[in-house]
Image: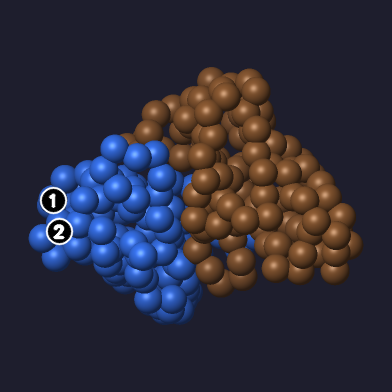
């Protein structure tokens, strides 16, 4: 059973701090990785996608991918109360397919 | 441009009843997906489609059926509803396969009693 694992949290950080969210995946052939943000009662929305080893930055968000360690992370700098949500990690199921496997999500609380 | 729309927003079913969850996208996307999300859990793929007339099973297809007669529409059919199907159902679409962003609809909350 191919899996994507995340710590369910909640992860609590003070406003202005860096929030670090982590994700591991079991399928070595996964090629694409995504971070979605989901507010309570709402649908997921894409924050970042990453396909290559290394870092990818977009504003306050940085995604990091290490395929050798099968590890993906999301850093949120200068965390704001509006960042409080559940963050879902997703990986493509296997190379060449159109399916994704989602983790159970990490709940982030940014304390004002 | 409405994106992905789903109806109904909320529905209560009795055990054994059937219903169809509607999903429509206006982005001309070939790929469409149905997920369910149980409380505190991630998204589980029920069915997906890579184009009109082509569908395939995901992780949890039992108790559900789909059809894709047009690019825009991807309805999900529940036959003989069971309490285990109480969940929030999300439809999503993307322009290509596994490297493209999935756009999600607002969800349908289903309660089976």
Chain name for mark 1: A
* Residue pointed to by mark 1: A53
Horizontal and vertical percent for residue A43?
Answer: 58, 51
Q: Colour of chain A?
A: blue
Q: Residues within 10 Å of mark 2 (few under 14, many from 20)?
A: some
Q: CA distance from mark 2 to mark 1?
A: 5 Å
Q: Quadrant of residue B17?
A: bottom right
* Residue pointed to by mark 2: A66
Horizontal and vertical percent for residue A52?
Answer: 16, 45
> What residue sits 56% from the left and 72% below the top?
B40
Chain name for mark 2: A
Horizontal and vertical percent for residue A79?
Answer: 37, 65
Q: Is residue B49 left or right of residue A88?
A: right
> What residue sits 85% from the left and 64% below the top?
B15
What secondary structure is found at the residue carrying circle 1? loop
Sooner in the amino-acid sequence: mark 2 or mark 1: 1
Q: Colour of chain B?
A: brown
């Amino acid at each position: 059973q191919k899996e994507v694992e995340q710590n369910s949290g909640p992860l609590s950080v003070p406003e202005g701090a860096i929030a670090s969210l982590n994700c591991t995946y079991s399928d070595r052939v996964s090629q694409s990785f995504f971070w979605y943000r989901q507010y309570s009662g709402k649908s997921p929305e894409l924050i970042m996608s990453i396909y290559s080893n290394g870092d990818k930055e977009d504003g306050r968000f940085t995604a990091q991918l290490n395929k050798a360690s099968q590890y993906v992370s999301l850093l949120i700098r200068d965390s704001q109360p509006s960042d409080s949500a559940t963050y879902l990690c997703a990986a493509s199921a296997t190379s060449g397919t159109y399916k994704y496997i989602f983790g159970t999500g990490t709940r982030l609380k940014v304390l004002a | 441009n409405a994106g992905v729309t789903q109806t109904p927003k909320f529905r209560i079913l009795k055990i054994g009843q059937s219903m169809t969850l509607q999903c429509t996208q206006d982005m001309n996307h070939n790929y469409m997906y149905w997920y369910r999300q149980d409380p505190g859990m991630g998204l589980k793929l029920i069915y997906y489609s890579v184009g009109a007339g082509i569908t395939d099973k995901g992780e949890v297809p039992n108790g559900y059926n789909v059809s894709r007669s047009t690019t825009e529409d991807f309805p999900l059919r529940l036959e003989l509803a069971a309490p285990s199907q109480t969940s929030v159902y999300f439809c999503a679409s993307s322009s290509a396969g596994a490297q493209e962003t999935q756009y999600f609809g607002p969800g349908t909350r289903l309660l089976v009693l």
